[in-house]
Image (cartoon, helix red, strand yellow):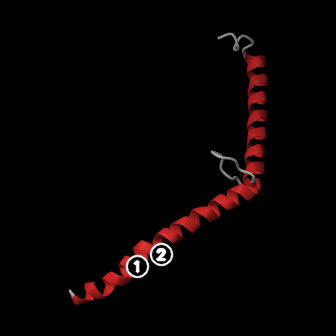
Amino acid sequence: MQTFGFLSVPLIIFLAVVAPLWIFFHYVTKWKKMKLAGATEGQTVVDSRELRRLLDLAERLEQRIESLETILDADAPDWRKQ
């Protein structure tokens, strides 16, 4: 019981002062990072490498769809009507 009494004062100080300040400054830092990156409300910041990767993926998928459509046009000309 003595140990809990000894730890209760620092714990209360931490929970009442340090934890709220920590949380506040954490979100202020995140807000500033998003503001510097040009993100508006409701948007998220995406790394430019990730955007390039997604663009490359979309281009490859588009090429695959075009290839499949060419094959289907040759094999079954009426496939678009179905």
The residue that label 1 is drawn on is: 13
Residue type pointed to by label 2: Val
Question: Does 57 appear above or below 6?
Answer: above
Q: Nearer the viewer, residue 20 or 45?
A: 20
Are the residues flagged by discs 2 and 1 in contact, CB closer than 8 Å?
Answer: yes
Q: Residue at x 71, y 56 (%)?
A: 35
The image quadrant that residue 73 belongs to is top right
Quick check: 71 above or below 64? above
Kindly identify which numbered label has been placed on residue 49.
none
**Which label's residue is closer to the chain start, 2 or 1?**
1
x and y percentages locating residue 13 in the rendered image: 40, 79
Which dot marks residue 18? 2
Name the residue: 54% across, 65% down: 24
User: For numbered disc 1, what is the local secondary structure?
Assistant: helix
Q: Nearer the viewer, residue 17 or 61?
A: 17
Where residue 45 appears, x then y in whole percent?
A: 69, 53
Query: 45 or 38, which lies in front?
Result: 38
Apparent side of residue 80 relative to residue 14 in the rendered image (left or right): right
The x and y percentages for residue 21 are 52, 70
Residue 77 to residue 57: above or below: above
Percent position of residue 50, x then y: 72, 53
